[in-house]
Image (cartoon, rainbow, N blue to C red):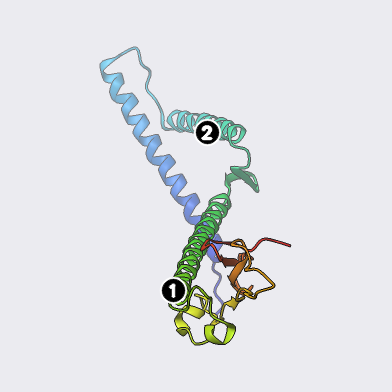
Amino acid sequence: MPTISLTDIGRLRFSSISFFLLLLLVCTIFVQRLWNRLGNDFSQLPRLSFRGALAGVTLWGLMFIIVLTMISGARELMTPGAWVRTGFTSQLASQQPAAIGDQVAQEVRRQLSLQSERLSLQSERQVQLHRLWLELKRWCVEHDGLYPTAEQYATLPAQLRLVPGDLPAEYVYRPPVMTDEIPAESSDTPLVIEPAIFSDSIQLALYQSGVVAPVESP
């Protein structure tokens, strides 16, 4: 047998209208009885019929709707975009600004975390170069002030010759030239240079003076 029923949206609207009418009738009966009860103590008050109470409650409801509409209009003027039009009524806009704010906060936290990691890695790179400097100075003390050659440098501990980080790359060693005709290079000459493998595009260098600083552009 065919059956006729309302859709889900229709049932929701029917339930809402039914609840509204029931609430209107309850308020009407309450107002009528309250008014007539006051009439027992104040003889000047006329008796209130059900129709009059219904008209009064409906009028007050319309006035409240006008007041609430004015309040929502004032809020819209103070916060543009907070309300959106949906048919004959308006409702609060979605929480998209809040979602955007959360995304911005997450991006800021991510950038701060990356910056902290970069600073930590850069500090570790400087410490590693200082360790290599101490080893090279120890070599100079043991070999009459001469730096190791490229072949001798390769015999140093591997943990000192490797750049800290995920890539197992070695430093570029540039031994000073020491001959009778050519004097020793100045202390501002790079002795050890990092390979260009870091995302910050900064190459640190260990100078003969023991200073660790970025490589100067030619």
Q: Does residue 161 appear to the left or right of 45 in the view shown?
A: right
Seen in the picture, residue 160 relative to 114 is either above or below; the reply is: below
Quarter of the image where one finds residue 135:
bottom left
Residue 142, image x, y percentages: 43, 78
**Nearest to the observer: residue 109 or residue 143:** 143
Amino acid type, callout 2: Leu
The extreme right residue here reads: 218
Residue 108: give x, y in percent of width and height.
53, 55
Q: Name the residue under label 2.
A: 68
Q: From the viewer's perspective, is 117 left or right of 41?
A: right
- Residue 12 locus on image (x, y percent): 50, 58
- Marks 2/1 in contact by CB < 8 Å: the verdict is no
- The circle on residue 1 is none
Q: Cα distance, mark 2 to mark 1?
A: 88 Å
Quadrant in the picture for residue 183: bottom right
> Quadrant of the image for the C terminus?
bottom right
Residue tagged by mark 1?
Answer: 141
Q: Which of 184 and 116 is in front in this view?
A: 184
Are there few (<14), some (14-19), or many (20+) residues within 10 Å of tag 2?
few
Q: Position of residue 117 (x, y in %)?
A: 49, 65
Q: Which of marks 2 and 1 is in front?
A: 1
